[in-house]
Amino acid sequence: MNRSDRIRLFLSQYSEEENNALKIDKDGLEAELSKPNIPMGLLMKGLIYFGGFISSMFFILFIFLFGLGNHEWVLGGLGISFFILGILIQRHTTEIFFDSFSTFTFIIGQILLVTGLGLADISEHIIILLLIVINSIAILLLKRYMLLFLCALTVISTFNFWLHLLKVQLVHHLLIVTLGAFITFFFINEGKVYSMLKKRTEIINPILDAFIASFLIGLANFIYDEKGFIIPYEWITTVTISGLMLFFLIYSNKKLDLGYKPLTFFIFVILLAVPTLYAPYVMGCLFLLILGVINNYKTLKGLGAVTLVLSLANYYYDLELTLLEKSLEMMASGIVFLGLYWFFFHKKNSNEKV
Amino acid sequence: MTKLTRNDIQLINKYADFEENEIDTTLKENVLINKEEWNNTLRIIMLTLGLGFFAIGLMFFYAYNWDDLSKTGKLLSAELVVICSVALFIFYRNNTIYSKIIATAISFLIGVMFAVFGQVYQTGANAYDFFLGWSFSIALIVFLTDFAVLWFLYLLLVSTTWHFYILQAVGRNAEALELLVIFLLYVVVFVFTHYLQNIGKQIPVWWKHSIVMIAVSVGTILGIEYIIEFKIGHLPSGMIITPISVVYALGLYYSLQEKYIVPFALILFSCIILLTTVMVNEADDFITATLLVSLFVLMSMTGLIYKVVSLQKKWNNE
């Protein structure tokens, strides 16, 4: 059943079941549903973005080769004009090619602006602040998924980079925990968020995805340490993420009647957190997987599973044991998991779970 | 009852006057997980993690002690693994999808067995012999199993064998010949697939997409190498230009007749790339070339996308 039929069926069923009718803007809904939705395969979209990418790369090359690379203010001015052009194109078109073109114009504009300001020896802190302000303003003006996602991602990543510059390592923990708390808050209060952002529903998905992507980037910073930015006290993040995970599990258990005792969740989280105390990325990826599974958010499920496997591989790689001991430990963990499976799911007599 | 998706609920919320708790209830009924699905997911996760950890641990244990094994031990373990898989295959022979997956695993393990032979008997780094032997030994298995994934991997194996033949037996300057034969191979496979589909055999969609994509990519690389005159060797230009042009023209005609958009878009995109290469190659002044290329790609991509979208609209409405 395609989207229009599903929605119409739901609305008719809803007005039958509930006594008070739902006030619906019928004309608006009908207009939106009857927009022709041409199924564009992934291949086509990839092709279009690749074409836009080649075109914009050659254009940047042309600008630099033409000698404009020496004049900082020209670069900066061009940057601002491209960036505004990108926003204008996007607001006035629905074709996918112009959408991708505006994306690349926007990105080129920002790159040119940053290069120009950098060459003019303006302080890095001001550049970062400017980037954050421009992208935040752009979020208020834009409408389509790709650019909104990129703007939100830029804002948070620039902030992350700023922390690197200022060399305040401990705030990194705060950043990851805040992002995790935002994501959890979104999923717990989804109804409230939807009704708050009623006028601007299109920013919900991109900003959520940007938060998730930045959360992963923050976790990856634990693996790829730069010189001079080794993050101390990794256990802070592990403990806080485990706390968030426990809270979310117990809350969902109550809300969705999953039928588990809170104590089970507590033991489960402690069992996994203690060995990986100094490797917060394992708990982080497991957290994303659990969020995705409980909320049935497809990309998050896949992303959580893949990143969990990668982080487990990294964890075992980093362990300072001999290969023999590592292999024995892996076999032992496997047996533990199989034992848990047997214990929980092979009870023949009762259907009750512990 | 068909369930709504999250995007549907967001859309309804935009135009209707939903209350917070109504949204939450709708989400709970349609989108969020329930007890049964949660238990199923937990079961899958625990089983996967348990078996996965155990298997990888066993493999690492083996790898750690590999050097201490005798020669007989190494050969014996490789052969035992193949025998166990064949036994599994016989056990599952009635269950189609399991038997096909096990057959794929057997084909892979035969290659591993040959590699172990090579390592034990120190036959030297002769990749061509290894791949040739592997291809011949699993040919019958692949043909009888008739599993799309296995056929695809077998095609990749045959291409690799041909690559190593050219590299070791013919010499370094024959890259064009290598690409030409691979190009023709995949085109022939595609034509064969078309006839099989006409007879009534079920061909998965990804198979046709992948074959077309590989064929067009190899054709593009071949074209680029011809244009910038890179490692052509002794192949006359006619032998490169003619097959590519003929195949592209026929491909465009085929895609319009069969209403199959993928070859159409890919072939025209490949032509855009080839024309770009010609422009960059022929231009004396690199700077103007970059501007020209950028504008050309922009306009041709716009034209291509318009044409693709209008074709799809026309075919959807018929």
Image (cartoon, helix red, strand yellow):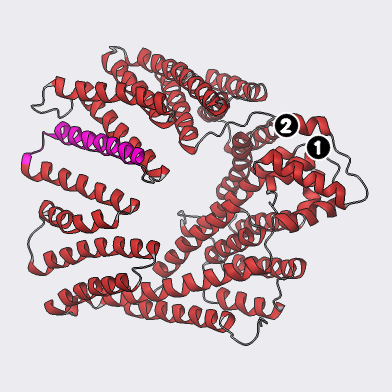
Establish whether labels 1 and 2 are both on one chain: no
Outermost residue toward the bottom in this view: A349
Q: Main secondary structure of the magenta part?
A: helix
Q: Residue at x 47, y 17 (%)?
A: B303
Outermost residue toward the front in this view: B199
Q: Amino acid at mark 1?
A: Tyr
What SS does tag 2 mark? helix
Return the residue nearer the eye: A155 or B196: B196
* Magenta segment includes B183: yes
Tag 1 subunit: B
Q: Position of residue A63 (x, y in %)?
A: 45, 19
Which quadrant of the figure has residue B214? top left
Q: Is residue A105 visible?
A: no
Query: 10 Å neighbourhood of mark 2: few (<14), some, or many (≥20)?
Result: few
Q: Position of residue B226 (x, y in %)?
A: 20, 24
Which quadrant of the figure has residue B110? bottom left
What SS does tag 1 mark? helix
- Residue B209 relative to residue A56: left or right: left
Q: Residue at x 52, y 73 (%)?
A: B46
- Residue A180 relative to residue A12: left or right: left
Up-down: is B115 above or below A275?
above
Range drawn in magenta: B170-199
Q: Which mark is residue A32?
A: 2
Count the numbered circles shown.
Answer: 2
Return the residue nearer the eye: B28 or A54: B28
Q: Are marks 1 and 2 in contact (CB under 8 Å)?
A: yes
Tag 2 subunit: A
Q: Position of residue A111 (x, y in %)?
A: 52, 30
Q: Quadrant of the C terminus of chain B?
A: top right
User: What residue did someone put label 1 on?
Assistant: B15
